[in-house]
Structures are given as C-alpha cells and as structure tokens.
Image (cartoon, coloured by chain):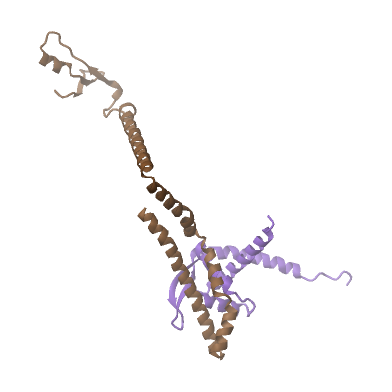
Amino acid sequence: MIILERVCKWLPWRRAQRTDELSNELRTHLDMAIADRVARGESPESASANARRGFGNVGLATELARDQWGSVDAWIETHVARNLLHAARRLRRAPVFTITSVLTLTIGIGACALMMSVVSTILLKRLPYGQPDRLEMIWGYYPGANLGVRERADAPSHAHRSDDGPPERVASSPE
Amino acid sequence: MPNEPVTSRLELLQGTLDFIVLQALRWGPCHGYGLVQLIRSHTGNVLQVETGSLYPALQRLLRQGAVSTEWGTSDNDRRVRMYRLTANGRRRLAAEQSRWEKLSQAIAGLMIPPAPADA
C-alpha cells in the first residue's frame, strides 16, 4: 500500500523532473540564439524578439517533445498503479471480506501444497535406495513368544534381494 | 481510415528529420542549438530545422536508443545537454543512407529532361 502510494507519487515526480530538464534545455537554446544574434551586431531587444520569433512557442515545443516519451511511465501511472491503489483502498474499506478472502486463499493454497508434497513423496518420487523395485519387506512372527519379544519381532525390516548370496539388510524400523 | 494519408505523410517527414539529425551527429556530440546551426550551414542555409520539430525528434531518437545524452558545457560555459550517436544510431544511419541514395537517384532519373520528339 505504502509502496504503491510512493510509486504513484514518484512517477509524476520523475516526469516533472524530465520536463524541467527539457524546458531548461529549450531555454538554453533560446539564450544561445539571442547571444549569437547580439554577437552579430543586433541590439539585445531586437535579438531577443527575433530569436523568440524564430524559436516559436517554447511551451508547445516542450509539449511536443514530451509526447515522444512513449509514456510507458505515464501508462503505468494511469493504468497499473492507479488501479492497484484503487483495489487496495476498496479492500481496506471492506475488512471482513478481505480477511475472509485472504484466509480462504491461505488455507486453500496451504492445503494444496501439503497434499502435493505428500503425494509427491509417497507416490511419485523413487525410494532413496538403489534398485528400489527389488526391495522386499520381511515380517517375522513368533507365536508363543512373550509380548516384549513379539513387539520386536513384528517390527518390519527391509531387505534387498540379490541374485546370489543371502539377502542384504538395508534398513529396519527402530529396535 | 480517413486520416491515413496524413499519418503516412507525417511519418515520411519524421523519418526525414530523424535522418538529418543522425547525419548531423556524425560530426560529433552536439547540443540542440548546435545541431540547428550545423544543419543550416551544411545545407547552404536551405534546411532550417524548427525547434518544435527538433526536440521531439531528439526525444524520439533517445527513446529508440539511436542517440544518448549527457550534460556538458558549451563553448561559452553554458550547461547544455549533449547528444551523441550510439552504435545503434550508426547502424540505422548506414541502413537509411542507402535508402536515401536510392531515392534521390530515382528522383534524379525522373528529372532528366525528355529528349525532343523531332530533333
């Protein structure tokens, strides 16, 4: 909001500065023309009058030159910045609507991001082992063993099936 | 479009002025007043560029990147804006130069007096 207001103030200021530079430039031009005429022997008064006549309308010349600026900043000023500022003001005037919309968007985007990260980790990404398609899960179950042992025995352990030799144990749940 | 002829005529005039200004800047960096003097003296006082057209042309060339500016001081210690031809401007000048040469040759061809029918 504050940044937007600054941009809206800064753009016309920048334009005014450029206009200032331009009219300074044109005034210098006129001064040089007068000086040249005086140097050629005209009286200062007639030099000034003649130079002004030759120069034409200073304001109009400035205006015409300014028209060439392509007015990108003028366009941003009138269309983008002003509309954004207007939208921001409207939102501030209706705080309940603003808060509801912001919350809806926040929760919606958050839920989507969460869902996507779960799906990506579980379903889409490869397991962080070499040859994950050859991974087996082995369950041990010992009937009659006491509870403490059974809990340990039920813990899944992952093993790698290799073509020759015994299976290789790569990871297991904490013991 | 009803005003199309006017627009194209304006574009032709603008193109001519831009070309003249770029040509004048070949002599080195120059300020606006200097450009008017230079163009007048190099065309034998024939071409008098109006300020109301020159400064728009300069702003247009600036925007197109054909010239660059910096603030400097003139011979008699005035703070002036100096215009300088950029590499882009030189390329454009080279391209337009051949176009203008073709055009002026074409017009010169038209201006040859017709041979008398029965000499």
Residue at far top of view: A144
User: Quadrant of the image for the C terminus of chain A?
Assistant: top left
Chain shown brown: that is A
User: In the rendered image, is residue B90 in sight?
Assistant: no
Residue at x 54%, y 68% (from the top left corner): A63
User: In the rendered image, is residue B16 in sight?
Assistant: yes
Front-most of residues A58 and A97: A97
Indicate the position of residue B16 as horizontal and vertical percent values.
62, 67
Chain shown purple: that is B
Question: In this rendering, would A164 be left or right of B51?
Answer: left
Location of residue B21 by image quarter = bottom right
Question: In this rendering, would B33 be left or right of A92?
Answer: right
The image shows residue A154, relative to residue B31, as above or below, that is above
Q: How many numbered circles does the render carry?
A: 0
The image shows residue A24, relative to residue A134, as above or below, that is below
Residue at x 83%, y 70% (from the top left corner): B115
Indicate the position of residue A173 as horizontal and vertical percent values.
18, 23
Residue at x 67%, y 59% (from the top left corner): B3
The image shows residue A80, relative to residue A107, as above or below, that is below
Residue at x 46%, y 71% (from the top left corner): A20
Question: In this rendering, would A168 be left or right of B103?
Answer: left
Location of residue A145 by image quarter = top left
Front-most of residues A14 and A102: A102
Front-most of residues A127 and A98: A98
Indicate the position of residue B64 as horizontal and vertical percent values.
52, 62
